[in-house]
Every structure is written in C-alpha cells, then in structure tokens.
Image: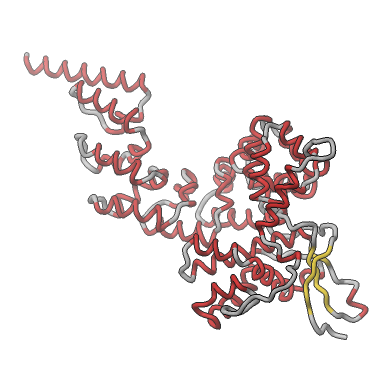
Amino acid sequence: MRASSTSFHFLEFPSLSRGPVDIYRSQLFIPRKLFFCRAKFDGSFSSRVRVVPATLLAAEKEEAKAVLNLFLKKQGLSNAVASRTINKSDIFIDHLVSRLHSVHKSRYLVGRELTTLEIRDALIPYLESLREEHGSILVDLLENFPSPPGKEKPIGPVSPSHLTLESKKQRAVSRVSETGPAGQLPPHILYLIELGMDLEQIKGITRKFPAFAYYSLERKIKPVVEFLLDLGIPKSDLPTVLTKRPQLCGISLSENLIPTMTFLENLGVDKRQWAKVIYRFPALLTYSRQKVEVTVDFLSEMGLSAESIGKILTRYPNIISYNVDDKLRPTAEYFCSLGVDIASLLHRCPQTFGLSIEANLKPVTKFFLERGFSIEDIGTMITRYGALYTFSLAENVIPKWEFFLTMDYPKQELVKFPQYFGYSLEARIKPRYALVKEAGVKLLLNQVLSLSYHNFDKTLKTKMKKMNSSRASNDT
C-alpha cells in the first residue's frame, strides 16, 4: 500500500552519519528527542524508514529560523521585529521543519542531510505563498500558528515538541546548577569550574545554548578540552574559547573536529597557528566543509590566490561566518562601484566585508563626497587603507577630519595617506604635529605619523639643520 499520510514524531535514537548540513548547527539541543517520518509503506520499503537525529533536527530548526528571519526582513520588518516574531513562533518553526521532511523525505531515507540551499529552496516558496494568501496578517499567523488570527487557541495539554524556548533554557540552567545528594554540582560543571569558569558564566552559556547542559564529561567535554590544550591553547584561554563556541564540546574529535582541521590546513590555514586561530574564532571548527568551500570559491572568484586565501583564513577566520550571497558579494559589488581593488581589500582588511552597506559603508562614502573628495579619490583611499571604513564616523573620522582642517596640508594628502585616520588623535597626531609646527619645518603627513619615534626625531632634526643651513647661506 502506498503512503496515505505522513506525520512527524519524536523518538530517542542514536546519531546518524553526518552530511553537508553545517556541523555547528548540528550540535544544538533538543531534549533527547528525535524526529521520524511515520508513513504507511509497503513491507519491502518500511525497513528503509530512517529516524532523524535530535542534533540534526535542532540544526534544521535553526536553519528554518534563519530562512524565516531573512524572509521577514525582506518584507520590510526590522531586525528587532523579525527576531521578536521568530521567538514567538516556535510552533510554526516546528511546522517548517516538518515540511522539510515531507518535501525531502527521500533524502532522509538514505541518511543524507540537506544543504543550506536545499532548505532555502524548500521553504522560501512556501513562505511566499503564505504571504500572498494572508498579506498584512502574516505575522499574526506565524505567532498564533496553527490557530488562524482572531480565533482563540485551543485549550489543552501542550505537546513536548511545543515547549517554549524559555522552558528549555530554564530546564538546562537547572541541570547545570542542581546539586546531588552530597551537595555537589554535576561532574562536568565541577570540571569546567576547575578550568577557570564560574557557575554564573556556565549558566550564561547554557541560556544561549541549552545543549551545553547535556554534554557528557568523559565522552564530550574532557576529550575536546585536552585536545585544545595539546594544540597549545593556554588553560587560561579555554573559558573564553568555550564561552565563544560551547558547541565545540559537542563535536566528535575523530569524526568532525580533526577531519575539519585537516581540510582547513589543505586550504592553507597555518597549522602552526591553530591556537591563535581557534582563540580568535572557535566557530571555524564547527562549520561544514560546504560552507567553507562556498566562501573559498568566492575569494578565489575575487582574484585571490590560494596562498592569500590561506593567509586570510589564518589571520581572519571570521570571514567564513559571512554569508556569500547576503553579505560578501553585495559588499564586493559596492566597493567595486567605488573603483576599489577587491582582491587587495580582501587581503588587507577582510573584516571590512562584515560591515553593513547601509549603516556603515554608505555614510562614510557620503561623508567624504560632501567634503569634496571624488569617487576616484575615495576608491584610492580604501584600496590603500581598507580599515578606513571600519572606523566610527562620530568617534573617529569626524574629529580627525576637523583637526586635519587646522593642519597646513591639502586634501590630497589624505588621498595619498589615508592611514592618517588610523592613528590616535590625542596620543600621536596632535603631539607630533605640534613638534613640526614648533620646529617650523615641512614634513609630509606620512613622515609625521608613520615613522618610529627615533626616526621621526631624526628626520625632524635633519630638516631643521637643512633649514638653518639654508637661512645662513641666504644671509651670506
């Protein structure tokens, strides 16, 4: 008999082999429950029905939230409103995950996880259809799902699968802080405290990532901690690393962590720098290969060599967290419109590509245009000093610009040396310029600021000596 209906339920089941879904997402927590597709198949097919692991289900739930967040913002909702709507739409998120399993049930039957693109392709058209059908009441629909807006929700027992996120957080926090018969905290909490973490810090991590409360000390936490110590990460840095990315403790060393590191080393990450790389951005080790490859392909497309890409991943691994289609590519297109050398900017200052075009980049461009700089000037400045756009207009650029106006330099001096904005106004710019003025000599802006104190003093004295010799010669 063919399947007549399909529904989804939670069961306990061991984890299946991992696929391309991001590893970091696959470590999120859903309380010891699993999703499986219950359908009426014929006898020969029923043996192929697979259960979906809790970790994968949690990952897909986070992916569904991300897709919904992106969709809501495209409808004109602010970040705050979109986030608030998602936080109130737990049941609808579960519904989206159910829909994923319905659309792609054949993938799960063979144990294959969905890619981010496949998840988006499955959910976006469905969300669009809901928007067309419900229009202005879409948000109400999401928050009150499955009850239509305007109708009271049915009163009855709440399914465990519909527990609110807040309830899960409270249960997880209780788990890490409860004491046993002897008045002691759980063993894995005591171990973390010995590493230098305090209970409040652990509670804070657990509120953000409830799965952390359920990680086994001997099978999860301890092996990862010892591995990180062997890599050269100081014990004093471990609390910071685990706070930044507690999911690390839920990853298998042999199946995920070590293979991921080997993969990244093959892409050019300096294996001698792993301690620094992990401290800077521990989340790097929790991303899927597919996610990393998409970013690497983009960097290559922008004209960066394999060697340069390796250096970027080592120096600034955070770039892997930037979505290529939503963040990296639009930012590259914006800088390209200014005539910026994209490869050079990525190599020198990859963090610039994490900035908001509307909130960060356009205001800085507008500032310089309003002060008489051309688009070509601005493009040259950014190419020469990519960090220029990372500075706050109000706290950095404007005060330094106003002081520059009191200096005896043409505007083009800033085009030649935009690094001016990277020096401290009070500790470097003002004191050095005061010495130049006092000496009565002329120095390029570059000479005033970029030279070491010894070389600056030497250059200043040499200029003064030449000036005095010239005056004496003229007098004679």
Name the residue nearer the viewer: 329 or 147: 147
Name the residue nearer the viewer: 188 or 427: 188
Q: Percent x, y for residue 66?
A: 59, 62
Q: Is residue 237 left or right of residue 218?
A: left
Q: Percent x, y for residue 308?
A: 54, 45
Identify whether 264 is placed above or below 118: above
Q: Is residue 243 left or right of residue 470?
A: right
Going by the picture, which residue comes out furthest to the left? 475
Q: Percent x, y for residue 127?
A: 58, 75
Identify whether 200 is placed above or below 167: above
Quarter-of-image position of residue 107: bottom right
Going by the picture, which residue comes out furthest to the front? 155
Which residue is painted at 37% across and 59% down in the image?
337
Residue 272 visible at all: no
Which residue is painted at 58% across and 55% down in the image?
295
Which residue is painted at 64% across and 70% down in the image?
92
- How many tags in the picture? 0
Name the residue nearer the viewer: 58 or 422: 58
Q: Quadrant of the C terminus?
A: top left
Identify whether 257 is placed above or below 406: below
Q: Is residue 442 left or right of residue 277?
A: left
Which residue is painted at 75% across and 69% down in the image?
157
Q: Quadrant of the N terminus?
A: bottom right
Its colouring scheme is secondary structure
Residue 103 visible at all: yes
